[in-house]
Image (tube, rainbow, N blue to C red):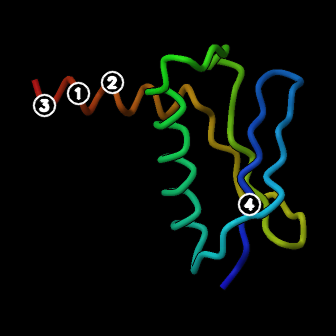
Amino acid sequence: MTVYYFHFQSGRRLILDPEGVELPSPADALEVAAKLAAGLLDDREVACDWTHSAFRVEDQHQRRVFRLPIASVRARDNRSRALLN
């Protein structure tokens, strides 16, 4: 198992995840990051420039695993909603 840290970046602002989450694979980390992003997008009280925001996911060795742009999650959610209608 690997500990993954989900740091949130919006423009030059970076909010570090001090705890991380132990997960079995990078695919599981991607699923968690997508759920975190969707939660932020659904929260009407969060004001942010989503086009310049992303989750930077690192492992316990501070190696970058991936970067998930919030805009890509928003686009995926919009496509999913269009298919349901």
Q: Label 3 belongs to which residue?
A: 84
Q: Are marks 1 and 4 in contact (CB under 8 Å)?
A: no
Labelled pair 2, 1 in contact (Cβ < 8 Å): yes
Q: Compare marks 3 and 4 and give the one earlier in the sequence.
A: 4
Work out how far the residue at label 4 is from the one at label 2, CA to CA, in angstroms.
26 Å
Residue 62 image offset from top left, x and y in percent? 89, 64
- Looking at the rendering, which quadrant does residue 63 occupy? bottom right
Q: Which residue is mark 2?
A: 78
Precedes in sequence: disc 1 or disc 4: 4
Q: Earlier in the sequence, mark 3 or mark 2?
A: 2
Real-space Cα distance between discs 3 and 2? 10 Å
The disc labelled 3 sits on which kind of residue?
A: Leu
Which disc is residue 62 wearing? none
Amino acid of disc 2: Asn
Query: Could you say where residue 78 lies in the image, as x and y percent from the top left?
Result: 33, 24
Residue carrying label 1: 81
Snapshot quadrant of residue 23: bottom right
Give the Cα separation between the discs numbered 3 and 4.
32 Å
* Residue 34 image position (x, y, % from top left): 50, 46
- What SS does tag 2 mark? helix
Which quadrant would the N terminus be assigned to in this image? bottom right
